[in-house]
């Protein structure tokens, strides 16, 4: 058996990854270490609760004692744990620095001391910053522009330093915008789908022409597994979906699928420091033989249907704290 410590596994991508990993690799056992912040949700993993190869541990990646205790006997660490929402990083950056940077340091130290065989740091395309034309390669300079992306860039380079300095077998992935089931309804797609279902306004920041490259979360999980098997230690891998769309285009697709009126679209004050466009050159991964499997339009539509059919999952998340957050930060 190979023993994985997955951190942040109760969040959106981490929970999809644990499900993917247990299904794909019968020789793997997973410990999921998660603090259960507002974004951590054990409902995301209900179907795995009784799986004998899965164990949940409630705790913080910044807790050195706990992390060292868990790391003993672990083969692989995959670090998803992070504060992940850009808007929140603008309002309250401190939690981002603590978890995304210091937490990554605690995990890397444990990996070093316990001689972990592989450490995968889940970074993001946002570390490059915005690009108006062309696409970023792994060798391009990092120019993060929000407290979120800057904290992720810190962890990304700290992980690399542990490879260079101590020989920790680190691989770093930088993926573009994910969508799919179990995404917290503060991110663009689940927020707009669920708001539309409730006939609530869809708050479009600025002119709505900011571009993101969308990838289905299962393709992200598949790419992580691919670099785990085929990636080089010390290397960075871009993981792009190859589906660049601006926010108005995404909004139109959602409204069309749900047969809701465009009058729900509401232009609001722009996000501070809002990156105009993200774009990744994923040719390094393609040359190794990996490419995404999901066709964008079909994957977006099946994701929309998932939220239509799983109101039990998102309705309870939408009735309080996060709505207050939006009302405070954006004039709607
Ligand atoms: P998420 O916010 O849905 O989940 C984050 C998880 O981390 C939650 O379960 C939360 O409880 C947990 N967590 C937070 N602080 C913790 C701490 N101190 N200790 C232990 N657990 C803690 O985020 P997500 O969208 O699933 O993103 C997961 C990772 O992937 C993040 O590192 C993010 O930067 C990266 N990423 C996300 C995207 C995207 O489009 N969502 C794209 C590229 C990279
Ligand atoms: O690119 C990868 C990143 O994608 C990840 O590293 C982050 O963790 C993840 O949150 C995501 O960041 P974005 O800022 O791109 O995602 P978000 O869903 O917040 O916003 C997508 C776009 O939609 C962005 O241009 C802002 C816009 N937007 C978002 C929200 C929530 C709106 O216009 N209105 C909204 O209400």
Image (cartoon, rainbow, N blue to C red):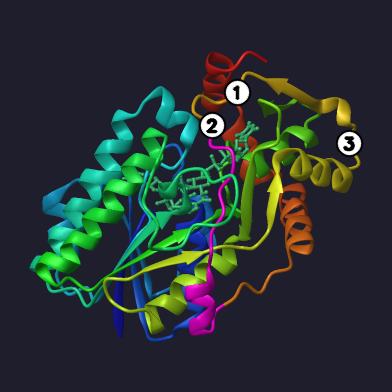
Tell me where the magenta segment starts and ends, as one range.
274-290
Q: What whole-number distance in Å separates the C-alpha atoms at marks 2 and 1?
A: 7 Å
- Does the magenta segment cover residue 275? yes
Asked if 204 appears above or below 287 in the picture, the reply is above
Specify whether 145 is left or right of 264.
left
Within 10 Å of disc 1 (Cα), the crowding (few <14, some 14-19, many 20+) is: some
Within 10 Å of disc 2 (Cα), the crowding (few <14, some 14-19, many 20+) is: some
Q: Residue at x 70, y 43 (%)?
A: 246
Between disc 2 and disc 3, the foreground one is 2
Q: Residue at x 90, y 32 (%)?
A: 261
Mark 1 within 8 Å of ligand 2, using the beta carbon: no
Looking at the image, which is closer to me, 10 or 101?
101
Question: Which of the 4 image quarters holds residue 49?
Answer: bottom left
Within 10 Å of disc 3 (Cα), the crowding (few <14, some 14-19, many 20+) is: some
Question: Which of the 4 image quarters holds residue 30?
Answer: bottom left
Looking at the image, which is closer to me, 98 or 272?
272
The residue identified by callout 2 is 274
Q: What whole-number distance in Å separates the C-alpha atoms at marks 1 and 3?
A: 24 Å
The residue identified by callout 3 is 260
- Does the magenta segment cover residue 326? no
Residue 270: assigned label: 1
Q: Residue at x 74, y 68 (%)?
A: 295
Q: Can residue 20 be seen here?
A: no
* Label 2 with label 3: CB-CB less than 8 Å: no
């Amino acid at each position: 058996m190979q023993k994985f410590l997955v951190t942040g596994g109760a969040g959106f991508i981490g929970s999809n990854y644990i499900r993917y990993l247990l299904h794909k690799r019968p020789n793997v056992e997973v410990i999921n270490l998660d603090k259960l912040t507002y974004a951590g949700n054990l409902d995301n993993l209900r179907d795995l609760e009784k799986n004998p190869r899965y164990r949940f541990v409630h705790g913080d990646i910044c807790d050195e004692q706990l992390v060292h205790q868990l790391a003993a006997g672990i083969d692989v660490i995959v670090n998803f744990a992070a504060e992940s929402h850009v808007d929140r990083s603008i309002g309250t950056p401190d939690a981002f620095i603590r978890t995304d940077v210091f937490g990554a340091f605690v995990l890397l130290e444990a990996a070093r001391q316990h001689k972990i065989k592989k450490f995968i740091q889940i970074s993001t395309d946002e570390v490059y910053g915005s690009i108006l034309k062309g696409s970023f390669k792994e060798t391009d300079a990092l120019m993060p522009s929000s407290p979120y992306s800057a904290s992720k860039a810190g962890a990304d380079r700290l992980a690399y330093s542990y490879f260079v300095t101590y020989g920790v077998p680190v691989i770093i992935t930088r993926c573009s915008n994910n969508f799919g089931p179990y995404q917290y309804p503060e991110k663009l797609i689940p927020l707009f789908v669920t708001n539309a279902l409730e006939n609530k306004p869809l708050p479009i920041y600025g002119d709505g022409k900011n571009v993101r490259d969308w990838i289905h979360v299962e393709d992200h999980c598949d790419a992580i597994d691919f670099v785990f098997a085929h990636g080089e230690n010390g290397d960075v891998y871009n993981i792009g979906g190859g589906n660049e769309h601006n926010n108005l285009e995404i909004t139109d697709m959602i409204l069309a699928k749900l047969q809701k009126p465009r009058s729900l679209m509401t232009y609001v004050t722009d996000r501070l420091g809002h990156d105009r466009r993200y774009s990744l050159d994923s040719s390094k991964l393609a040359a190794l033989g990996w490419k995404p499997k999901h066709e964008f339009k079909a994957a977006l539509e099946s994701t929309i249907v998932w939220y239509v059919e799983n109101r039990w999952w998102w309705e309870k998340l939408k009735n309080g704290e996060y709505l207050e957050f939006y009302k405070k930060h954006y004039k709607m």
